[in-house]
Amino acid sequence: MGKEMEGRKRNNVELFFLATLILWLTSVSFQIVLSHRTQLLYIIAGSFFYQTSNSLIRFFSSCSKSPPTDPLFVNTSVSLLHSIVTSTSVVFILFMQWSNNGLSAMFDHSQLVEGTWPWAFEALSFSCGYFAYDQWDMLHYRLYNGWIPSILVHHLLLLICFTLALYRNVTINYLILTLICELHSIFLHVRKVRRMAGIRDARSVIIKLEWFLNWTTFFVARCASHILITAKLIKDAHKFGKGVELPLALFGMAGMNSLNIGLGIDLFKAFKRERKSQQANQHQHRE
């Protein structure tokens, strides 16, 4: 009886998030076809690109059989690819903008809210497509935990915020700034992939370097960038109109900063576990 109830709850969770994903796709399709918003095709291109990457990784992984074709391994590998593509795009966009206009003009309120840097719309759309793909992949292979899976809620909120911004063509540059955190996500996914591949020697120079870059990008690309964006929003609060942009932006950044705290705690626990494992191994060798 308990297993039957558990199965029903899981099915209800899947149905809810699948329904929201279908509604989202329908909305995007209507915008492209009926409103002739052809720029939004980058969203579809992003979903197609990452789904194709998933299929290719699954194919080559099954051929080599090392590491095994595990849905979580494939999903994490595609997430790593997304982090590399997105962070490279964001750094390129910011560097070009800085070179052409300088920092003061670059971070002007009107530029961040109403302007759109070259390639920013396309980069945000492509990343939006990834979150749609990832939501589907996690639902399809049940790569989530709990009755209210935080990862699925996170993806749904990002899809809503990103898509609304793309529809209205506002706060695009602000959202591009938030994606700087993907620099840190690279090393999160690298750690997960190498552990699934069975590489766990904490004494390795490569793993020590990985942890150094993991912590550095966590504090610089994730924590510091999100705190600065929040501070900028608060400082320029009086410059926003009476629409939903400011409340939505502040709510979103509050959520991101809260997630960063939780992520930092989880990272520290993982770091301590690896250090303890290393010390235990050293003790055994001495004996």
Image (spheres, rainbow, N blue to C red):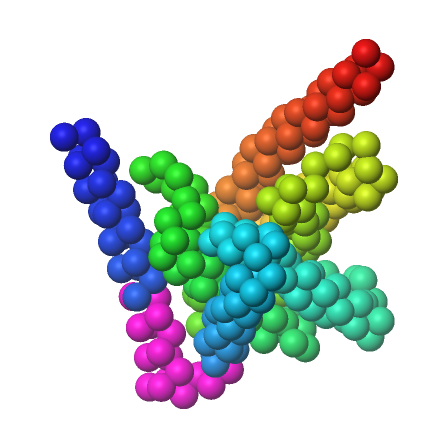
Provide residue 205's location: percent of width, then percent of height. Answer: 85, 40
- Taking the spot 48% from the left edge, 74% from the top edge, the residue there is 48
- Taking the spot 44% from the left edge, 83% from the top edge, the residue there is 37
Provide residue 166's location: percent of width, then percent of height. Answer: 49, 70
Q: Is residue 261 above or below residue 154?
A: above
Provide residue 152's location: percent of width, then percent of height. Answer: 41, 49
Quick one: 277 or 174, which is closer to the camera?
277
The secondary structure that most of the magenta stretch takes on is helix
Q: Is residue 66 above or below residue 119?
A: above
Q: Is residue 32 above or below residue 197?
A: below
Quick one: 18 or 226, which is closer to the camera?
18
- In the picture provided, is 4 more to the left or to the right than 230? left
Quarter of the image with the C terminus is top right
In the image, the segment drawn in magenta is 23-39
- Taking the spot 72% from the left edge, 70% from the top edge, the residue there is 93
Answer whether residue 255 is visible to the viewer in this image.
yes
- In the picture provided, is 144 more to the left or to the right than 73? left
Quick one: 85 or 204, which is closer to the camera?
204
Does the segment drawn in magenta span residue 36?
Answer: yes
Q: Quadrant of residue 118?
A: bottom right
Answer whether residue 178 is visible to the viewer in this image.
no
Provide residue 88's location: percent of width, then percent of height. Answer: 72, 65
Does the segment drawn in magenta span residue 101?
Answer: no
Quarter of the image with the N terminus is top left
Q: Is residue 64 above or below residue 257?
A: below
Q: Please, which residue is most extreme toward the left here?
A: 1
